Amino acid sequence: MRLIFMGTAEFAVPSLRNLIRAGHDIPLVVTQPDRPAGRGRRLTPPPVKVLADEYELEFCQPESIRTQDFYETIQGIKPEAIIVVAYGKILPENILSVPPLGCINVHGSLLPPYRGAAPVQRALMAGETTVGVSTMYMDKNMDTGDIILQEKINLDGDEDYGETIATLAEVGAKLLLETLVQIEKGIAPRQPQDDSLATYAPPLTRADELIKWDTNNQNIRNQIRGLSPQPGAYTWWNKEKLKIFKTQIVDEVSPGLPGEVTKIVPDQGFVVRTGKGALMILEVQKQGKRRMLASEFLRGNDLREGDRLGRW
């Protein structure tokens, strides 16, 4: 099938790779411009560009996809379908109307719940035990198109965002190939979404990253899982940010204030009281340092029982 692929983030890489290996004709890959990243804020190519370059595919990185020039480029290629995976922008109607077989999106949720930019993070932060991937025909609105195929995976409650998104990316890549097979055969289902069941997954904000110790331990653990490894949930200690990446639930804890360190376990980590119960902190990152086990952090820092996290 003659396809244009539009994608940017790491989530899109397995989908593009599968399309290439399956022998689809991909005359153009569209991805977002290089952006500053890392401590040095160096211009960094998006993962999809790196893969396209590896396979010597033609690619472009328009600042805007709403220009006449871009429309004419897409129209001139005459794609049978446009595949969109974690591209990061909503397609305008004139682009949606170009391919005769439609624009197909791979979305990281079991739609209609978790429409929007951060479906996997928001699902983990909400404590969902089932997540999944949907393929759908795109329309002019955000993630409201008719569903083609879906596949779900069950979580055991320990997975973080990094692990979950990697799994879903592979699931989505396989689902995309099956979707295209069914479209080519003319047997692909087209199930309208029930808008009454829709929920939204807005982009993450700085406020989402701050740990509020007066909430219950399970909610805080889910927040940490949903933000690990990036951007990372954080608290304050000694007037510095302390990111927390991995925890365990502790149900029994003596009375005291939320955020208080109640126990130091040198070979494991430290226990912090929450609004209900407590958490054993297992992996952290001090501001300006690398991620490390909490036991290693304890050897190099004077954290004591009775210290209170979250206070400037």
Image (cartoon, helix red, strand yellow):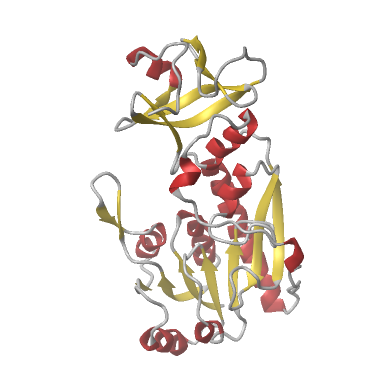
Q: Within the image, what quadrant is residue 190 found in?
A: bottom right
Depth check, front residue: 184 or 50:
50
181 sits to left or right of 46: right
306 sits to left or right of 80: left
Question: Which residue occupies 36% across, 87% down?
Answer: 69
Question: Which residue occupies 58% across, 70% down?
Answer: 142
Q: Count the numbered circles shown.
A: 0
Depth check, front residue: 134 or 128:
128
Image: 45 above or below 257: below
171 sits to left or right of 311: right
Q: Position of residue 191 (x, y in %)?
A: 76, 71
Question: Which residue occupies 38% across, 84% down?
Answer: 67
Q: Within the image, what quadrant is residue 62 found in?
A: bottom left
Question: Which residue occupies 43% across, 43% down?
Answer: 231
Depth check, front residue: 82 or 292:
292
Instruction: Answer whether residue 78 is visible to the viewer in this image.
Output: yes
Q: Position of residue 36 (x, y in %)?
A: 28, 55
Image: 1 above or below 50: below
Q: Position of residue 35 (x, y in %)?
A: 31, 59
